[in-house]
Image (cartoon, grey):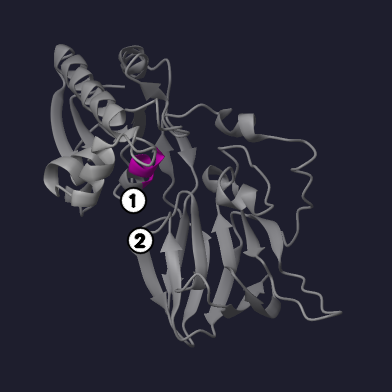
Amino acid sequence: MRLKKILLFHKRSTYQLQAVEYRDKRFMQLLEKEHQAVNRVQKAHFEHLSTLEFLIEELKSRKIEVESKARSALNHKIKDIDLLISVGGDGTFLDASHYLDETPILGVNSATSSSFGHFCLANENTVASILDQIIDDSIVPIPLIRLEATLNGQTLGQYALNEILVAHHNPAGTSRYIISINGHEEEQLSSGIWIGGPAGSTGAIKTAGGKVLPIDARQFQYIVREPYLRPGQQKQLLKGILSETKQIKMISQMRTGAIFIDGQHLEYPFKLGDELIITVSKKDLLAFVNRDLNDCFLNPVANKLTTKNG
């Protein structure tokens, strides 16, 4: 792969925000006391800076043009670059994915002492070798499916790589909606519903009882959180795995419902009578990740989920 221009998409660390920029009094007090709530943030900050500086030097040594943007400063689709490198953890990688259509992405875990970095193929110790393998085509990006949400006929601006959560805006509130899949329709009360692709199958969906899917699978799944069932009542659409050609339709029965895309940062209102349709996007994310990325989460017993509804 020919690399002429690269964008470094990097986070601002908790230490950078709270101690340097905001000078948060409470944060500074806890830091001074070496409180356990903040005792790792300073180490992670300096790890992050070291990784970022090292990466810039490696790119420049290969005569690659480097542009750098903070995570909070990007608000438009990225074009005219050969590769986006997210420098941070999984949150940075997910945020970066929302600005990409055709440009591939490489995740670099910049603070391995505090970040798992599931999507991050590289870290400071391995990124030089990974860059060389990308350049000589020893590794190539893998297409990962993303979900597209259409609200009242209008497609929302970001594709979900991990998952979409549809729920009451208040986490203590009851989520009320009508859900329709493959011609089957149900009225449900619950704590909300997770809908996610393979990339998100190792996180909240797994914890809620879903199945871990191979990272390159062409399927998505849904699972209802804490469904409310009256005595003797049964529901058919509580969880299932769907092929990429299927869709999920929901109608809100909430005055203050919400749609969350890949976490808490991207939120859309889901008001009474609103119609939401979730499908697999035609625009995959091209990501430098291992094909066996999700295998470490596989458990043959826990993942014996029956495929339903397609």
In-front residue for pair 16/117: 16
Write down the region rendered in magenta: 90-94
Q: Given the image, on which type of amino acid does mark 1 rest? A: His
In this view, 191 is above or below 74: below
In-front residue for pair 230/90: 230
Disc 2 designates what residue? 266
Q: Which residue is drawn at 16% across and 16% down?
A: 57
Q: Quadrant of residue 16?
A: top left
Q: Of circles 2 and 1, which is in front?
A: 2
- Label placed on residue 256: none
In this view, 51 is above or below 280: above
Q: Quadrant of residue 62?
A: top left
Q: Is residue 155 left or right of residue 290?
A: left
Asked whether the residues under the numbered discs 2 and 1 touch, taking CB atoms below 8 Å apart as contact, a structural biologist would say yes
Q: Which residue is drawn at 52% across and 62% down?
A: 279
Task: Return the x and y of residue 166 as percentages of the image width and height.
Answer: 51, 68
